[in-house]
């Protein structure tokens, strides 16, 4: 018989320490740090890893600190923050809606953010850096939130138990339809822009870290921080929601209110990440599913999903800059890898349905 591990208690908080998942999370953090240091070391002038670690620790010459701290560090940090934000947002939406396809990019949230961001970029001459980046972030956040509210209202109705609320499967289908409609809006915006503005916006829409700097990093980091706080504060609710509506209601959780709060945090987090670098496909979809399989948990683990999302984006940036003859936008690499993973999920779901 398997022994029951006693919980650790600190005041009114308690948690069960599981060694295997903890070791996996520590291993993921170590892999992320290694890729992060390697992403900084690679560039027009390659810098030894030991020197990178020395500069990050406060050493190095003035020239080395300028190249690493001012030029390369913001790009690498943006990759980590954006990947973690998308992974976390995907874990929250998939857990709440009980559907592995319920990621921000497939639900239309990312495309809604793109509509707002492209509108500002086209209106400001395609510039997405400096002070204009704050306008792009605000527009992306507004676009993502408005899209989420629209999908939520359209999905509202009577559930199978006779109560009123939002059904996960209905929300996913409506989200896919809204996503298709918003893609046509983006195309319409590009068709009405000047050639130069359309070229800048199209480059942003492919998902690129080339323009990443502190002005794009700070809003994304703020969104990730708020989402982490909300998720940590709602950890018990999130765990209960994974067991279904009936179990959640028995535990005394106000389902619709808690769903709305968590979805708002996930949508805001994904929208600000999109504003920083453009839409990165499939990161929010794949990271929670990979984390779930690694940790063998019944639901999508939030921390591990964020770590795997960050690893995916930093790793894709490394591949995009080192493997191919010409440096590619990081969004091209995530889409190339994520597309087959989506097919795998669909085939797996179809086989389960037919068994």
Image (cartoon, rainbow, N blue to C red):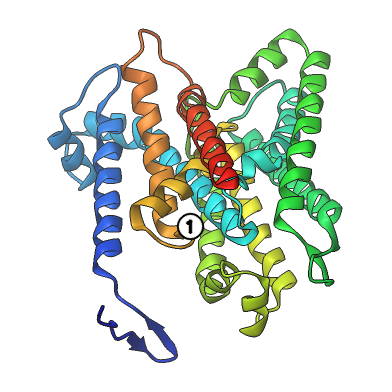
Q: Position of residue 59 (x, y in %)?
A: 17, 43
- Relative placement, left or right, of 289 versus 192 is left
Question: From the image, which quarter does the N terminus lie in?
Answer: bottom left
Q: Nearer the viewer, residue 241 or 214?
A: 241
**Numbered disc 1: secondary structure:** loop
Q: Residue at x 65, y 84 (%)?
A: 250
307 above or below 21? above
Q: Is residue 334 found left or right of 242 in the rendered image?
A: left
Where 125 sits versus 33, above or below? above
Horizontal and vertical percent position of residue 191? 80, 14
Residue 268 or 335: which is nearer the viewer? 335
Which is nearer the eye, 270 or 350?
A: 350
Name the residue located 30 percent from the left edge and 21 percent from the top edge: 43
Q: Quadrant of residue 265?
A: bottom right
The answer to whether one can see residue 252 in this image is no
Can residue 326 be seen in the rendering of this structure?
yes
Which residue matches tag 1?
Answer: 300
213 vs 305: above or below: above
Name the spot of residue 308 as percent of width and height, x first: 39, 46
Using the rendered view, name the quadrant where residue 277 is placed: top right
Judged from this view, the residue extending furthest toward the bottom is 11
Residue 222 located left or right of residue 321:
right
**Closest to the observer, 57 or 77:** 77
The number of callouts visible is 1
Up the image or down, 291 lies above or below 240; here it is: above
Say whether residue 30 is left or right of residue 257.
Answer: left
Query: Where does the image place residue 103, in percent across and percent down from the top left?
Result: 60, 45
The residue drawn where x is 62% and y is 77% is 247
> Callout 1 environment at 10 Å: few (<14), some (14 to 19), or many (20+)?
many
């Amino acid at each position: 018989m398997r022994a029951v591990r006693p919980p650790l208690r600190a005041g009114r908080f308690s948690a069960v320490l599981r060694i295997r998942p903890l070791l996996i999370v520590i291993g993921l953090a170590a892999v992320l740090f290694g890729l992060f240091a390697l992403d900084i070391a690679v560039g027009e002038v390659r810098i030894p890893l030991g020197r990178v670690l020395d500069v990050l620790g406060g050493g190095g010459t003035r020239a080395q600190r300028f190249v690493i701290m001012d030029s390369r560090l913001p790009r690498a940090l943006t990759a980590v923050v954006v990947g973690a934000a998308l992974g976390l947002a995907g874990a929250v939406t998939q857990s709440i809606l009980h559907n592995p396809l319920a990621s921000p990019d497939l639900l239309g949230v990312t495309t809604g953010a793109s509509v707002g961001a492209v509108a500002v970029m086209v209106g400001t001459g395609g510039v997405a850096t400096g002070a204009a980046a704050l306008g792009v972030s605000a527009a992306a956040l507004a676009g993502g939130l408005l899209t989420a509210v629209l999908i939520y209202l359209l999905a509202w109705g009577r559930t199978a138990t006779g109560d009123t609320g939002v059904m996960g499967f209905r929300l996913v289908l409506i989200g896919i339809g809204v996503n298709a409609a918003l893609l046509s809006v983006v195309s319409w915006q590009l068709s009405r822009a000047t050639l130069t503005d359309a070229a800048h916006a199209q480059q942003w829409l492919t998902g690129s870290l080339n323009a990443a700097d502190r002005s794009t990093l700070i809003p994304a980091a703020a969104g990730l921080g708020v989402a982490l706080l909300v998720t940590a504060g709602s950890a018990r609710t999130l765990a209960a929601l994974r067991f279904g509506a009936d179990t959640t209601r028995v535990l005394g959780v106000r389902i619709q209110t808690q769903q709305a709060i968590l979805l708002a945090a996930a949508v805001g987090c994904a929208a600000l990440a999109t504003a920083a670098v453009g839409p990165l496909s499939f990161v929010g979809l794949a990271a929670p599913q990979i984390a779930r399989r690694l940790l063998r948990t019944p639901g999508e683990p939030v921390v591990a999903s964020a770590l795997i999302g960050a690893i995916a984006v930093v790793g894709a940036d490394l591949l995009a800059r080192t493997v191919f003859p010409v440096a590619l936008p990081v969004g091209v690499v995530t889409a190339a890898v994520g597309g087959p993973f989506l097919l795998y999920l669909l085939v797996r779901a179809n086989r389960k349905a037919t068994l």
